[in-house]
Image (cartoon, rainbow, N blue to C red):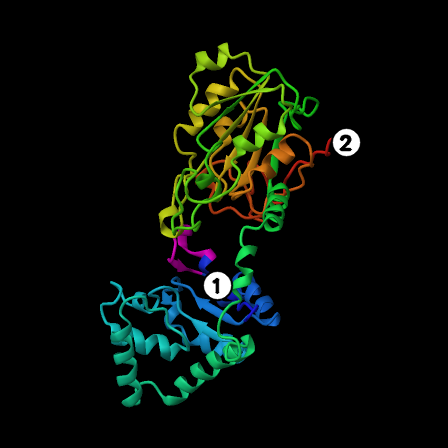
Amino acid sequence: RSKKVAACAKHYVGDGGTYMGINANNTIIDTHGLMSIHMPAYYNSIIRGVSTVMVSYSSWNGEKMHANHFLITDFLKNKLKFRGFVITDYEGIDQITSPPGVNYSYSVEAGIGAGIDMVMVPFAYTEFIDDLTYQVKNNIIPMSRIDDAVYRILRVKFTMGLFENPFADPSLAGELGSHEHREVAREAVRKSLVLLKNGKSASTPLLPLPKKAGKILVAGSHADNLGNQCGGWTITWQGEPGNNNTAGTTILSAIKSTVDPGTKVVYDEDPDSSAVDAGEYDYAVVVVGEPPYAETAGDNLNLTIPEPGPAVIQTVCESVKCVVVLISGRPLVVEPYIGAMDAFVAAWLPGSEGQGVADVLFGDYGFTGKLPRTWFRSVDQLPMNVGDEHYDPLFPFGFGLTTEARK
């Protein structure tokens, strides 16, 4: 039984630099920019022996990556000496034409001709096999191109030991979601959280929160919602809100298990101001953010926190000391609300282990995370990068406040 895994580097290349950030769109950049900004991760992957590379749906200066002979064959295979195989994205060759699939035989010819070795064809596989066979028999695609593809695929399979051990080892199934793995995930949550504000002034930090309190409020759409914590590509393609999709710990349940047994925790997803005022809370934790999404479904030019998120922040923070925890796949518009918050934490998509959030909120561990990208004031500033002439972010690249763990 095999214990080996083949890794895939994707999506080759430049898919992070598309026009307006639109998924699968056009990356407009010169060769030097492509090589210096977008290619380095592939250099590193190939040096470390990655087995497969997946081509991007996107284009480079108007040419579809799935049909780019220069980047797939001349550069990746010949210049970088990549020895594994190149695979398409899902129905990737179909998208060589616009609309997709309108001239399938051309797509086969252009994609295979560019140097693609394995093709992800979920539905039209008989058509693909017929078209490819016809083109090889009629010398439209040379046999040398087929030999290259087969040689590479077999090399990866031999390296994986698949001819000796074609099946995975079922005794490893229990490792998935094991306690040890969840502990590593919880540690990753603690280390990835970024503390962006702590106190209305530096002399009055709110965090770490005291575990011992009379009564505290937990509010917001993301406080008790595993699906929202996990985001897209979780069990299902787009992910889904709620607590039925996967196992884990919500931030609310983590808070409840972390505070002193005598501390009363009140959860109100969308409280009204009179309830907040009457509650006489010591402090509040507001957890808001984006719904799950993947790929194009996440394309968004306004980047606002969905309602009622902003309203919950304002309602709670105007009358109670509050820490706002934002669950999102990217920086969102927070500038209008930042003044109202006593503390602000970017939690990204922490996944199943919400306990990692409570670990740092309550000081069992310190905050150490730094921003992996610039946080804008308003979307009008985008795109904005370090080194720009008028670089004026809300929080700069690399920013992150730290706290000490409570002894």
- Residue at 45% x, 45% y: name it: 246
For residue 407, which numbered disc appears in the image?
Answer: 2
Mark 2 falls on what kind of element? loop
Mark 1 and mark 2: Cα distance apart in space? 43 Å
The residue sitting at 25% across, 80% down in the picture is 130
Q: Which one is in front, 277 or 267?
A: 267
Q: Most extreme residue toward the front, as rendered?
A: 171
Q: Which residues are magenta?
A: 16-28
Q: Is 126 situated left or right of 19 in this image?
A: left
Residue 395 visible in rendering: yes
The circle drawn on residue 245 is none
Q: Which residue is mark 1?
A: 10
Q: Quadrant of the C terminus?
A: top right
Q: What is the count of numbered marks? A: 2
- Name the foreground residue: 22 vs 227: 227
- Horizontal and vertical percent for residue 110? 33, 76
Report crowding for label 1: few under 14, some 14 to 19, many 20 or more residues within 10 A (C-alpha): some
Q: Quadrant of the N terminus?
A: bottom right
Does residue 393 show up?
A: no
Q: Amino acid at mark 2?
A: Lys
Nearer to us: label 1 or label 2 = 2
What is the quadrant of residue 394 in the picture?
A: top right
